[in-house]
Amino acid sequence: MSSVSVKDLSLNFGHISVLKDLNLDIAEGEFLVLLGPSGCGKSTLLNCIAGLLDISDGQIFIKGKNVTWEEPKDRGIGMVFQSYALYPQMTVKGNLTFGLKNAGVAKDEIERRVARTADILQIQPLLERKPSQLSGGQRQRVAIGRALVRDVDVFLFDEPLSNLDAKLRSELRVEIKRLHQKLANTMIYVTHDQIEALTLADRIAVMKGGLIQQLDTPHAIYNHPVNRFVAGFIGSPG
Ligand code: ADP
Ligand code: MG
């Protein structure tokens, strides 16, 4: 059974067609990267999977269940955005637990999950700080933590590192890879950065103009691009 399955998905904004009859099957535990230039529809596709946009046509399944019309909170997904969107007035711990408290998760379960998340992301010393007292990399770690505490099956990342400088970006890239190896859950990761895609992905879906041009392993995409666009974008010899 696929972890996430997108069937004949179309999305229009007004009369502009942004996603065109997309099909995508993501395996349990797979790290799938959506790669493509700005404006090709990566975030739109991710937001459809998350349930943040109503699709125009098609269906979305998560773990075999048709979630096309389910609320985002009922889809079993956690999302990490480019902008950290932490609550500035709350501590790190408050940011991690806010959603859980609202969802009625028991207090000792919340404590257990915070401890585990802090341990995995190495943010124990930061729990009582406010976001303004954190570096960019620490903030993004907390943003990842907010998805992690939810104990979800599927993580969605939308360019989580693109606001960071090059050094931090490569550090966090390693951490995200480690996180995936440790949790072994499904991750869908949007980026326009070829290096990120090639180093993180089990498979890469290269997108252009609302269509998937090629879906394959980094090795296959790099060595056997299906067309000039893919070759040019991935920077392969051709
Ligand atoms: P990407 O994440 O790959 O950069 P997006 O998914 O954000 O691309 O956008 C895909 C296309 O849809 C772009 O042409 C963008 O201008 C358009 N678009 C995105 N959001 C909206 C919206 N809310 N209303 C109208 N057009 C939109
Ligand atoms: Mg985007």
Image: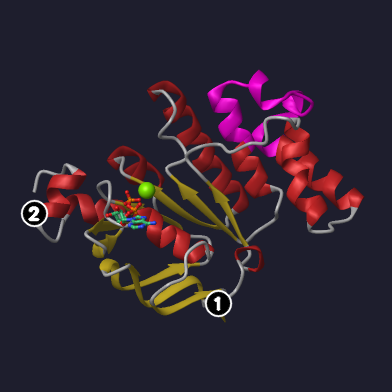
Residue 208 among magenta residues: no
Badge 2 is on which residue?
228
Residue 100 visible in the picture: yes
Marks 2 and 1 sit apart, C-alpha to C-alpha, by: 37 Å
Q: Nearer the viewer, residue 236 or 229?
A: 229
Q: Earlier in the sequence, mark 2 or mark 1?
A: 1
Q: 214 left or right of 26?
A: left
With respect to residue 13, does 93 lie above or below? Answer: above
Residue 204 visible in the picture: no
* Residue 179, percent from left and from top: 57, 43
**Segment colored magenta:** 119-142
Q: 222 left or right of 93?
A: left
Q: Secondary structure at mark 2?
A: helix
Label 1 packing within 10 angstroms: few (<14), some (14-19), many (20+): few
Q: Nearer the viewer, mark 2 or mark 1?
A: 1
Which numbered tag is attached to residue 69?
1
